[in-house]
Image (cartoon, rainbow, N blue to C red):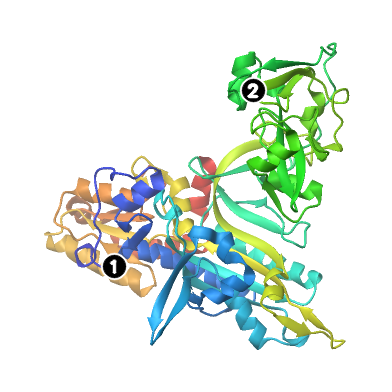
Amino acid sequence: MLWTQTLIPTMKETPEGAEIPSHVLMLRAGLIHQVMAGAYTYLPLGLRALQKAAGIVRQEMNAAGAIELLMPALSPLSLWEQTGRVSAFGDVLIQFAVKRQNRKVPMVLGPTHEEVITDLISKQISSYRQMPITLYQVQTKFRNEERPRFGVLRTSEFLMKDAYSFDTTVESLGRSYEAMYAAYCRIFTRCGLPFLPVEAESGPIGGDASHEFMIPAENGEDSILHCKQCSYAANQEKAEIGARDTTTVPVAPGELKPVPTPGATTIEQVSGFLNCRPAKLIKTLIYLADGKPLAVLIRGDHDANENKVRRVAKAQTLELAPPEVIVAVTGAPVGFAGPVGVKQSVRLLADRDVQAIVNGVTGANQADTHLVNVNPGRDFQPEGYFDLRNAIDGDPCPRCSGVLKMRHAIEVGHVFKLGTKYSESLNARFLDSDEKLKPIIMGCYGIGINRIIAGLIETSHDENGIIWPVSLAPYEVLICPVKITDEASRKAADDLAQRLTAAGIEVLIDDRDVRAGVKFKDADLIGFPLRVVIGERGLKEGKIELKWRWEAAAETAPLDQAAESIIEAVLDERQSGRRFSAWMQSR
């Protein structure tokens, strides 16, 4: 392929509105073009990289025994109403109606395909003999993203691989899940991603039922906790906190008394008004757990983890109580609730760190008033002390004596045990060996194909541009004749390209009549793994220059042996990724 015969609109300056490296570089390198907020055209180079990522995903999914199909992006709204996800998705779900003859047909642009695949299985699988089976697709998804940003990391339209497993038992689901987990590890390794599998919130079956695959990155929107000592890793929604010292400081308990705090309703306002640290405050949060009021105590400088609260409370649903419920329970407006002297008797759960607070501060259950010198055990007695908060940087590891480190990360994949949520809603059942009708047990497994590309660029670039591994690079080799108008240089470039192409190597010739510096800058910006420079002087000496994108120094090679050595090196790197991996690990 010749540079002048394709479309590669590189840019010298940072585009307006581009915030993070992957967004900046994908625009500058001519990989994508923004159509509107949250929607991008993939230009020829970007499409080649995207297709390579999808190809690796397909290869590993097939190797794991999954079967590919293709479902429509459109689906009837009625399917989503059956599972209750119309309200669950809210405005994120893109809904519309089309006119057909004399009626309107309500439709959905699928953000995911659990409903469609389960409806299919409910009509095609009826016996335990037809399972286990895992089906997958690579399909465009649509979500009405309120704030599209960060280039292709958060868009309204994106390419996703979604797979769904169907099993007869929980044990069989476990085997399907492990097969997908292992396939994901192979996929992200082949793509050159520095990924980290982390524990995530479990499905309705419970247990170790969900993992997210994260790329640690400074600009990641997710937070993960990781222990280097034992490799424990979890997202902040899931992360447990190890044992910590809850013994109280030997300070005499003070006299419990109310203090006026007019207009101070937030932790910052109260701590400023009373001149105390937020860690001395005890937040009282009122929830509705399965519709019943529940009070939860959290230290002022911590945030409640609602998943942990829900599990400890043994509730199916959990939501913050509306103001009228808070007033009914505490007798006070929002911002002044406390565990001492509540109006109604409710369950009271406390985070473990609350137990160590001495002479703390809480709401007084009356407007514009707080209590000081509040002490657990003396002034209130919770049902128990539990791990109810979000883990933070520096917390003890729950698996060893190490310390958790918080990192930002980009999610590229998620494996999840669904259980029977969708099969129950959509009547996907099977007859077991005893002729009993049972709901099919499901798992789902997603990979953001676009996120593979953006995540790789986010973690693999330098001040000059993108650094691709051979596995994802739009072209593996860029041939740069320094002077394209020189007949000998042009012929040498064409001959070398033909030999490489015949061996299956992906080659682009930069045949532009521009300065060598311009070609080299564009080569580094786009990030072709191997640049081959053909100069007039080198040709006279029978030599060409070879430079791997991630290596500082170039090397020379005899022209008559160049094709063989390039073919061998590129095929080896395509298979092993050794050079790129060594560079990534050395950083």
Q: Nearer the viewer, mark 1 or mark 2?
A: 2
Residue at numbered disc 1: 497
* SS type, badge 1: helix
Give above or below for 142 relative to 327.
below
- The circle on residue 406 is none
Q: Which residue is mark 2?
A: 368
Whether residue 323 can be seen here: yes
Distance, label 1 to label 2, CA atoms, is 78 Å
Q: Which quadrant: the N terminus?
A: bottom left
Q: Is residue 472 left or right of residue 352?
A: left
Q: Residue at x 40, y 43 (%)?
A: 20
Write down the quadrant of residue 13 in the picture. top left
Instruction: Name above or below for residue 465 compared with residue 512.
Output: above
Where in the figure is residue 553, as x and y percent of width and height?
37, 43
Q: Give the x, y percent position of residue 422.
A: 67, 71
Can the viewer see residue 562?
A: no
Q: Nearer the viewer, residue 554 or 202?
A: 202
Considering depth in this image, is 127 or 277 the residue closer to the camera?
Answer: 277
Amino acid type, mark 1:
Ala
Name the residue type under label 2: Asp
Q: Is residue 328 above or below residue 187?
A: above
